[in-house]
Amino acid sequence: MPKPHAPDKPAPHAARRSEKSRRAIYDAALALVAEVGYPRTTIEGIAARAGVGKQTIYRWWSSKADVLLEAFLDLSDQASREAGAQDAYVIPDTGDLAADLKAVLRLTVDQLKDPRFEAPSRALAAEGVVNEELGRTFMTKLLEPSLQLYVDRVRAAQEAGQVRRDIDPRIALELWVSPLAQRWLQYTGPISYEYTDTLVDYALHGIAAR
Amino acid sequence: MPKPHAPDKPAPHAARRSEKSRRAIYDAALALVAEVGYPRTTIEGIAARAGVGKQTIYRWWSSKADVLLEAFLDLSDQASREAGAQDAYVIPDTGDLAADLKAVLRLTVDQLKDPRFEAPSRALAAEGVVNEELGRTFMTKLLEPSLQLYVDRVRAAQEAGQVRRDIDPRIALELWVSPLAQRWLQYTGPISYEYTDTLVDYALHGIAAR
Amino acid sequence: MPKPHAPDKPAPHAARRSEKSRRAIYDAALALVAEVGYPRTTIEGIAARAGVGKQTIYRWWSSKADVLLEAFLDLSDQASREAGAQDAYVIPDTGDLAADLKAVLRLTVDQLKDPRFEAPSRALAAEGVVNEELGRTFMTKLLEPSLQLYVDRVRAAQEAGQVRRDIDPRIALELWVSPLAQRWLQYTGPISYEYTDTLVDYALHGIAAR
Amino acid sequence: MPKPHAPDKPAPHAARRSEKSRRAIYDAALALVAEVGYPRTTIEGIAARAGVGKQTIYRWWSSKADVLLEAFLDLSDQASREAGAQDAYVIPDTGDLAADLKAVLRLTVDQLKDPRFEAPSRALAAEGVVNEELGRTFMTKLLEPSLQLYVDRVRAAQEAGQVRRDIDPRIALELWVSPLAQRWLQYTGPISYEYTDTLVDYALHGIAAR
DNA sequence: AAGTAATCGAGACGGTACGTCCGGTCTTGAA
DNA sequence: TTCAAGACCGGACGTACCGTCTCGATTACTT
């Protein structure tokens, strides 16, 4: 939700807000981040590209990161609407946990490599590392909902007796999500279907000899 | 490695470099990042605090991130020299893999919470997310050597028959390292001894019912 | 004339110009030149003293000399408005050319010794020596109008039969104006009423024996 | 003999001075002033072009202006040595004052238009306007000796009964020298033989009707 | 002829100012 | 009121030079 960045200011009258400007700003912000990277994306640049006054940005958002976060949320919404709200946004339950996780992770791999998503999400993640407030928002708004899907799927597997009852699903999911996230974010290794498949196997059965 | 950021410029004569200035710059950079955070740390600020001309920074480093990377490497070296190269920098091999990993991870948790390290390493990690070159340098110079220790320890466990032979140690270590890293970097959850202990258990034995 | 010194830039919108800033910049520039001299007057110094952003100076003027030229023109305008457009700005015609010239030159001597005028006009003259464009502007805007008054007065004297018809007034006036100017500018000698009186006598009657 | 840490100048040991460096510095200074103008001539630039350390300049001169003054004096000496010390440097006495003055002034016009002299002398004159010390040195070392020649010639004319006895020669010479100097320095008008001839005529016989 | 002290080329250093870019605020006139 | 436009104050950027300060390597005078 857009909020004025000086909280004591009178909230602008949202009803009069120009939808066209908002869209133009989202587009300009995403395009600039993709083209020149996050640090060289400036508010002035976004305003100029969107054909919008700077004040129109400052009126509705508090920072570059904030603009980008919303733009990205909007992009995700669009994408999920296009995709008809299945696919990546619900984890299938075929009864085979390993297969289901592998399938979803392969979709995630595809998305991480989609250039439309890469620049802005990387930018947001980076800013979130250093800017705690944004980090938590990013986490809450974007990551947590996706992670919750894994929690649900793991719980279902517990019900089905496929996962130990004493396992905490919130931690379990990190066994495959975090490695993938880190390789992507920090260039600590290549990303592939084979890699995510391996992660699922290790996570499910452990690495210890039996 | 310090290198002039305009690559066509004549390399400065390193022999004449002022050791005192270099130290002062490291100290100032780390202190500022700790005090005001990465984005509000400026080259001018570092120069002023170090009692140094700006040009002395630009002569030897190409960017704020570069200064900080070196300063941090230097800090790590110091720390490891102080610690006499035991502690966190070699993984014990008591024969009990789980116990050894838990012990090392507890030290890592301590270090992640050490305020001396937190601000600069977070800053570097963030910049590394968005600046691929720095990211890879950060990875190569700082992360990889630590990860190699895990690789070695897991290999030893494989020799001892405690870990399956078909496990790739480089991937295995991500089961505990990446979740911890992500929680720390992206505020995706709290960090504690209990948490890292749990990660080790899940990683070793898997989450699947047996 | 204010003009952006990068001629390909869009001209700033003069209607929105802050009159307050302009005045503050004039005042600061003149004060600084008077206090610390031209070479130690800096754009940063003017901006700081005027309580103005540097960009506001760069937006409207192309150089320190340009600021000072305008400031000085403004000062002259003010002075002449105060003086009610008599005094030094019209040469009297009492019928006695020698007396009239001596009277005006005495006023000029006074003005040259006025500390409000000395520093900036000296500074401008100096810059004009080395910077041809400014030199010509200085000449056209400031000197030429004053000189024209002498041309007119000499012409009147020619009409009255007091000055030879074949004399070029534009050259004649240099006989008294240039010596005074050079003594003042280049410290080639002291300046006094007696001196200017002498100049007028020599110029009118020549130095040759009759 | 030279004390190392005196509060005054250390007074370097001139006997050890490198003649080659001095020449190189003169040449570089004059060339740079001619090529890029006085303000963009820098000590660093002179040192680099002369293939000399900066300290070698600071050891022997106190400022850019000082270097240039000496370089110019040296150039003048050379020129006068080349010219065999007659020509422009002694005013002829043919008994006809007007003719003699016109002849010398024509030589001066030539010299003012000589590009070798123009840039450096203009530069020095400009600096002299704003820097009183240099101005007086310039005056004393360069101008005054030349002016003295006019004083002598005018005195001779007084002896010969061609110039009134009550004329002050030091002021008289300004009637032709200053107008020429001002036109040249301040671009207040064109310079030609005709112009200087006219100045001499006006100065000798005055502009008043007889 | 060897010793020694200053000068030399080179260039790093602490600084100051440059001219530019952009952040975030404020003002104007059109819609 | 909101909007596009953009001037405004402020502050950091990366660069250019300032004048000072080492550093060997000559170089020229002493002994």
Image: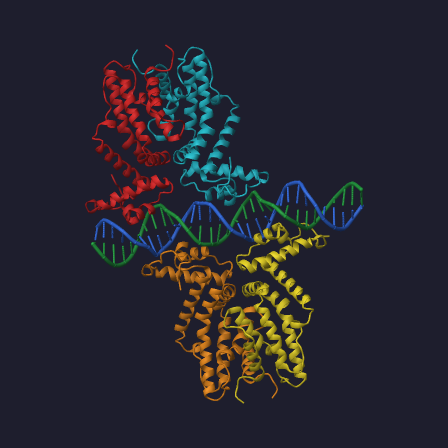
Chain colours: A red, B cyan, C orange, D yellow, E green, F blue
Quarter where residue B115 is shown: top left
Q: Nearer the viewer, residue D127 or A32?
A: A32
Residue at 50% in and 85% down: C166
Place residue A75 in its image quadrant.
top left
Query: In what quadrant of the picture does the C terminus of chain D appear?
Result: bottom right
Q: Place residue B37 in its image quadrant.
A: top left
Q: Is residue B180 left or right of residue B85?
A: left
Identify whether B192 is placed above or below F3: above
Report whether residue D11 is seen. no
Q: Nearer the viewer, residue B143 or B46?
A: B143
Q: Position of residue C26 (x, y in %)?
A: 42, 62
Q: Residue at x 59, y 54 (%)?
A: D46
In the rendering, at what x and y percent does residue B45 appear? 46, 43
In the foreground, A175 or F22: A175
Above or below C134: residue A191? above
Left or right placement of residue A158 versus residue D171 in this view: left
Residue A120 visible somewhere in the drawing: yes
Location of residue A171 in the rendering, given as x and y in whole percent from the top left corner = 32, 22
Q: Position of residue A68 (x, y in %)?
A: 30, 39
Count of marks placed on residues: 0
Q: Is residue C67 above or below residue B193?
A: below
Left or right: C115 with respect to D161? left
Q: Furthest residue to the left?
A: A15
